[in-house]
Amino acid sequence: MDCLFCEIVRRKIPAKVVYEDEFCLAFYDINPQAPVHVLVIPKLHIESCDAVTAENSDYVAKIFEAIPKVAAKAGLTGGYRVISNCGADACQSVKHLHFHIVGGVQLSERMG
Ligand code: 5GP
Ligand code: ZN
């Protein structure tokens, strides 16, 4: 399977890792859109939010358990936004589920 984020999980492609456990990996986005911009991904290949099922949702729960640890490690003491782009209308460019953690600045009230 030709998946960029699976290759990052396998360490075939380098990334600046912030946090890792059995279920997920967090690393800095290569093209940050805020002072702090981290991606949290499941180690299991799940295409998007639209592909979450009863069989794989434990990985998603584990990601949300990891997010406070990721935020603390990234120094996000003032809060942060969690975003997952799903499908074409949301401009999802990497087809492996990921949650953007953005912060380090006062974010806009608008989201779309
Ligand atoms: P999407 O547009 O699918 O929601 O987000 C994909 C994100 O992955 C983008 O913010 C993009 O900058 C990031 N990205 C793409 N390729 C790489 C890469 O090779 N390494 C890292 N660290 N981030 C990447
Ligand atoms: Zn993948």
Image (cartoon, rainbow, N blue to C red):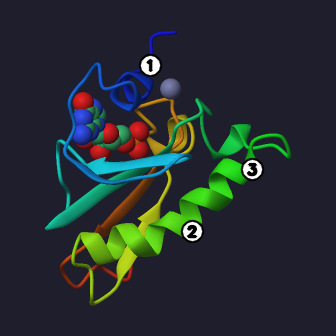
Q: Residues within 10 Å of mark 2 (few under 14, many from 20)?
A: few
Residue at x 86%, y 46% (from the top left corner): 54
| Image position, residue 86 (x, y; %) | 56, 44
| Image position, residue 8 (x, y; %) | 34, 29
Q: Label 1, label 2: how many angstroms apart (C-alpha)?
A: 25 Å
The answer to whether residue 112 is seen in the rendering is no
The residue at label 1 has a CB less than 8 Å from ligand 2: yes
Q: Nearer the viewer, mark 3 or mark 2?
A: 2
| Image position, residue 30 (x, y; %) | 18, 42
Q: Label 3, label 2: how many angstroms apart (C-alpha)?
A: 13 Å
Mark 3 lies on residue: 57
Amino acid at dot 3: Ser
Q: Is residue 83 above or below residue 88?
A: below
Q: Secondary structure at mark 2?
A: helix
Amino acid at dot 1: Cys
Residue at x 34%, y 73% (from the top left corner): 71
Residue 65 — which label? 2
| Image position, residue 88 (x, y; %) | 52, 35
